Image (tube, grey):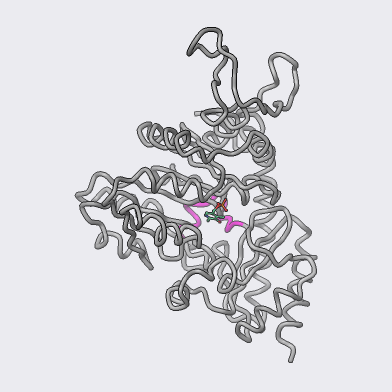
Amino acid sequence: MSPYGFSTRAVHVGSSPDPVTGAVIPAISLSTTFAQSEPAKPIGAYEYSRSSNPNRHNLETALASLEQGKYGLAFSSGSAVTAVILQSLAQGSHAISVADVYGGTHRYFTKVANTHGVETSFAQDIVAELAGLIKPETRLVWIETPSNPTLSITDISKVREIIDASDNKNIVLVVDNTFLSPYISNPLTHGADVVIHSATKFINGHSDVVLGIAVTNNESIYERLSFLQNAVGAVPSPFDSWLAHRGVKTLALRVRTAAESALKIAQFLEKSDKVQAVNYPGLSTHAGYDVVKKQHRDALGGGVVSFRVKGGAEAAAKFTSSTKLFTLAESLGGIESLLEVPAVMTHAGIPKEAREKSGVYDNLVRLSIGIEEVEDLIEDIKQALEAATAN
Ligand SMILES: *Cc1c(COP(=O)(O)O)cnc(C)c1O
C-alpha cells in the first residue's frame, strides 16, 4: 500500500522518468512487437502489443493504485469491460443487476449475455430484494452507484453482507464506479470484488478517448479477465492509454471542482419553481445521504445532476436546446458541461414502463457539470428554464 495521498499517486504511479532519455513524460510506444534475445526470451517486459504495451501498463498500474487494488486492466471501452466480465461466466450462470443500470449494460444483459446462456434478474431496490433473488447458479451481482440517470445510492457494504450471508459462495460483486471516479469512492474498500469504469468519462475527462478499466484484488479474477483481455483483443491503443493516463493526473482537481459546482447547481434547481424534482446525492435531503457520507470522500455527490423540468417532454426538449454553455450531447465527465434527455437519448432502448419505474420520466434532464465557472453555468440554466417554461 502506497503511503502517498491520492493526487501524489495520480501524478507519479506508472509515470517514472524514462531511464534512457530522461524524458519526464513517458513516450508513446507505438511498436506492435518487441525484440527477443532468443526464442521466447523478450528483451524487456513486452512481447506483442495486444498482450501488453508500456502505455497501457502504465495506465493500468496508476488506476490499480487509485482504486486501492492490486491489479488493473484497461480495455477498448467501458462496454468491452462489461462484455469481458460477462464472457467470463459459464453458460447457465445467473446474474443480478440494479434495474437503473447504464443503458448499454442493460442492453448487454438483455440482448447479448442471454444468447450465451447468462440470464439476468433486475432489482429495483437491490438491498431489499437481493437475498430473495440469489439462486444456486448466481455468479454475479452488478451495481452502479450512483445509478444513471436517477442517481440513487446503493450501500456497497450492505450488498456485500447479503452476499456473504447467503449459501452461495461463488458470487462476484462488481461495482461500476464511472459516475464517481476513484477520487470520490473506492468500492473495493467497501467489499466489491471488481470495480469497473468507463474511463471515457471522468478518468480521461476531456471527451477525447473511449476506454474502459477494471481493478481487482482477487488474483484468480485478474487471471481470468487478463486472459480474456488478450483472447478477445478489446484493448485500447497506446495513444488512448497515454491520453487517459494524462487525464488521470488532474482527476482530483477536475472532479472536486465539478462536484462542488454540481452541489451549487442542485441547490439552485431545488429552489426553482420551474423544477418538479432534483436528484443529486450531494444534497443532504437525498435519500441516500447517510450512505454518501460513509462511501464518498467528503460526502461529495459527483459531477452529475438530474432533474425534472415542469412542462413535460416538450419543456425538457426546449430546455436542452436553449442552453448556451451546456452542449446537448450524450456522455458525461468531461471538462465541458453537457446535458441530455435520457428518455429519448441514452435510455431510449429501455421500454417506457421499465424506464418510468426507475424514475426516468420524459421530462428528466441529466446534466454533466464541467469545470467552467459555476456562476456562468447557473446563469445559463436560469435563462434556459425561462425559455423552456414560457408559453
Ligand atoms: C459510458 C458508461 C459505460 C460504457 O462505457 P463506454 O466507454 O462508453 O463503452 C458504462 N457504465 C457507465 C456508468 C457509463 O456511464
Give the image quarter of residue 312. Answer: bottom right
| Picture residue at 55% right of the left edge, 8% below the top | 37
| Picture residue at 50% right of the left edge, 57% below the top | 292
Indicate left or right for 45 with 275 as reference: left
Give the image location of residue 39, x and y in percent: 49, 10
Give the image location of residue 142, x and y in percent: 39, 54
| Picture residue at 78% right of the left edge, 77% below the top | 383
Give the image quarter of residue 58. Answer: top right
Quadrant location, the C terminus:
bottom right
Looking at the image, the residue that sits furthest to the bottom is 391
Q: Report if residue 298 lies within the magenta region.
A: yes
Q: Report if residue 91 lies within the magenta region.
A: no
Give the image location of residue 171, x and y in percent: 30, 47
Ligand 1 rendered quadrant? bottom right
| Picture residue at 41% right of the left edge, 61% below the top | 111
Give the image quarter of residue 271. Answer: bottom right
The magenta segment: 290-302
Main SS, magenta region, reads helix
Looking at the image, the residue that sits furthest to the top is 38
Q: In this view, does 161 lie above or below 49?
A: below
Indicate left or right for 281 with 168 as reference: right
Give the image location of residue 133, x and y in percent: 27, 61
Indicate left or right for 261 with 49 as reference: right
Task: Between residue 353 and residue 262, name the one nearer to us.
Answer: 353
Indicate left or right for 218 with 343 as reference: left
